[in-house]
Image (tube, coloured by chain):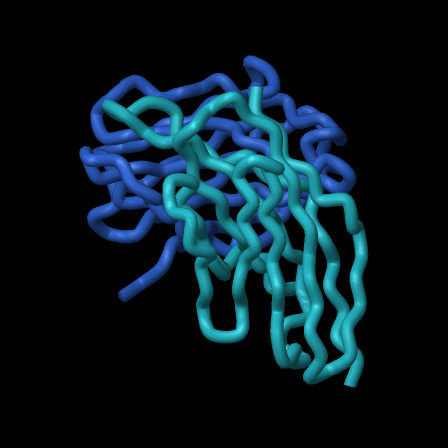
Amino acid sequence: AQTVTQSQPEMSVQEAETVTLSCTYDTSESDYYLFWYKQPPSRQMILVIRQEAYKQQNATENRFSVNFQKAAKSFSLKISDSQLGDAAMYFCAYRSEIYGGSQGNLIFGKGTKLSVKP
Amino acid sequence: GAGVSQSPSNKVTEKGKDVELRCDPISGHTALYWYRQSLGQGLEFLIYFQGNSAPDKSGLPSDRFSAERTGGSVSTLTIQRTQQEDSAVYLCASSLALAGGGPDTQYFGPGTRLTVL
């Protein structure tokens, strides 16, 4: 079974600085997807960024980028120019590739609580 | 367009009572998921509906939990004879689930916070 580990329960960053959140996963599959979701106090899970395992190029979305190391099974999230609105729980998630409509649920890490100091 | 909606936002019930939680997915999304978010347990998968296929119930923690999806749209998660350990936030998500596979991003609702006294 696949597992996702986030080893940093809490992180803190100064506004305008850069922070990196760690995520490692365990799988025997070769095709899969990785996601970072943000959950503010409102509880709404918001997709931050996603990565297809077959792509060597790291995904980027504005101030958010990932460092995807497939061999090391590592998927870290870098937030540049941190803003107060970035404060939230961040969850790393794994999903198998779907062929023919098989199981598509996400497997989540336990999350990292990010605080942003003004 | 409208996102995933869930109701009620909060639910307080007494131990032993039955509760129903509702999820309205994004229009056109064929896949619907229920997750449970408990303190200290993170997010765990409960059940998955895909089109007209039989649901994947592999994540349901006990036979007190059931879910249905009517007309391929709205879903109801029912918890019978609630226990205190059922207290959690129940999140619903939906996705397009195109036949060709792909990232198939899941979009989440705001969740229902269930408190069992």
Quadrant for the N terminus of chain A in the image = top right
**Placement of B48 over or under B96, stated as above or below:** above
Label the blue chain with its letter: B
| Front residue of A27 and A9 | A27
Number of numbered markers: 0
Residue at position x 54%, y 54% from top?
A: A37
Corner quadrant of residue B74: top left
Residue in the picture at 63% in, 22% down: B81
Which of A98/B85 is in front? A98
Picture layout, residue A66 above or below residue A116: above
Q: Does the rendering let one see residue A18?
A: yes
Q: Is residue B12 above or below residue B3?
A: above
Residue A99 x, y percent position in the rendering: 27, 25
Asked if residue A41 lies left or right of residue B69, the reply is right
- The residue at 45%/68% (across/down) is A61
Q: Chain A's colour?
A: cyan
Asked if one can make out residue B43 in the rendered structure from this viewpoint, the answer is no
Residue sitting nearer the eye, B57 or A61:
A61
Q: Quarter of the image containing the C terminus of chain A?
A: bottom right
